[in-house]
C-alpha cells in the first residue's frame, strides 16, 4: 500500500498524525478532567519482538509498535490501548496481530488493541464495526440505484399508455388500471427519494 497523506496536528506539545487522532486526544483529555479515566499516555511504545543477533552474526533491531493512546478507566486495572485510523495499512495490520498475540486478551493487564475510526455518520466506532456499517450503507445505495433503474424501465410503458390516451381519448379498463399503477409507483418512489435527501 502506498503513502497515505494526512495533515499533522500539534496540540498541547504533542504531534498527532491526523486531525482525527488529535480530536480523539481532546475527547480523552476531557474524560481525564472528568475523572472517567486515569494514566493517559500519548504514543506509548510496545516491543512486539525483541531484537536479536541472527545466524550471520547480524544485529536485528526489535519490532516496536507505537500506539496512539493508552489509559485505564477509574476503578479498573486493565490498560486500554487505542489506535485511531482512517484506514488500515498492511504494515499496521501485521503489528495489530502481533500486539494482540503478545499483549491482548487480558495478558499483562493490557486490553486487546482497539482500532477506532470516526465519521459523521457513525461517530467513534471500532474499525470492524465501521466497515460493517459502511457495507450496509453501500448495500442500501445499491438497492436504491436498482429501484431507480426499475422505475426508469417503467417510463416507456407509462409514456406509451399516455400517448394512447391522447390519441384514442380513452383506454381499456385494464390499460387505465396499469397507467394509474405506474403513476402511483413513480409518485411514491419520487416522494421516498426526496424524503431521504431532506
Image (cartoon, helix red, strand yellow):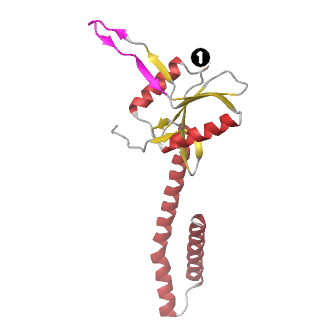
Q: Residue at x 51, y 43 (%)?
A: 20
- Which residue is label 1 attached to? 107
Q: Residue at x 45, y 77 (%)?
A: 156
Q: Residue at x 55, y 28 (%)?
A: 113
Give the image location of residue 16, x and y in percent. 48, 38
Which region of the structure is painted magenta?
A: 52-66
| For residue 87, side relative to residue 58 (left or right) | right
Q: Residue furthest right?
A: 75
- Residue 80: tell me if it is visible: yes
Instruction: Identify the secondary structure beneath mark 1.
Output: helix
Task: Determine the image quadrant of residue 61.
Answer: top left
Q: Quadrant of the C terminus?
A: bottom right
Magenta span includes 180: no
| For residue 172, side relative to residue 5 (left or right) | right
Q: Is residue 75 above or below residue 131?
A: above
Q: Is residue 155 above or below residue 66?
A: below
Q: Quadrant of the N terminus?
A: top left
Q: Nearer the viewer, residue 86 or 90?
A: 86
| For residue 116, side relative to residue 54 (left or right) | right
- Residue 129: tell me if it is visible: no
Q: Nearer the viewer, residue 66 or 145?
A: 66
Q: Nearer the viewer, residue 130 or 113?
A: 113
Q: Residue furthest front?
A: 13
Task: Determine the image quadrant of residue 92.
Answer: top left
Give the image location of residue 23, x and y in percent. 55, 43
Give the image location of residue 80, x and y in percent. 60, 27
Give the image location of residue 21, x and y in percent. 51, 39
Q: Residue at x 59, y 42 (%)?
A: 124
Amino acid at each position: 500500500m502506498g503513502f497515505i497523506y494526512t495533515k499533522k496536528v500539534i496540540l498541547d506539545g504533542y504531534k498527532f498524525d491526523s486531525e482525527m487522532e488529535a480530536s480523539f486526544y481532546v475527547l480523552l483529555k476531557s474524560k481525564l478532567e472528568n475523572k472517567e479515566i486515569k494514566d493517559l499516555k500519548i504514543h506509548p511504545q510496545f516491543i512486539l519482538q525483541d531484537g536479536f543477533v541472527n545466524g550471520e552474526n547480524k544485529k536485528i533491531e526489535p519490532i516496536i509498535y507505537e500506539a496512539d493512546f493508552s489509559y485505564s478507566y477509574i476503578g479498573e486495572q486493565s490498560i486500554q490501548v487505542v489506535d485511531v485510523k482512517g484506514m488500515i495499512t498492511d504494515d499496521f495490520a501485521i503489528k495489530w496481530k502481533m500486539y494482540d498475540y503478545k499483549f491482548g486478551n487480558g495478558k499483562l493487564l493490557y486490553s486487546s488493541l482497539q482500532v477506532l475510526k470516526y465519521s459523521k455518520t457513525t461517530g467513534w466506532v471500532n474499525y470492524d464495526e465501521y466497515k460493517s456499517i459502511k457495507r450496509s450503507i453501500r448495500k442500501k445505495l445499491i438497492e436504491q440505484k436498482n429501484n431507480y433503474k426499475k422505475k426508469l424501465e417503467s417510463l416507456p410503458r407509462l409514456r406509451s399508455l399516455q400517448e394512447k390516451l391522447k390519441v384514442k381519448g380513452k383506454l381499456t379498463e385494464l390499460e387505465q388500471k396499469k397507467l394509474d399503477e405506474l403513476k402511483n409507483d413513480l409518485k411514491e418512489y419520487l416522494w421516498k427519494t426526496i424524503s431521504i435527501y431532506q
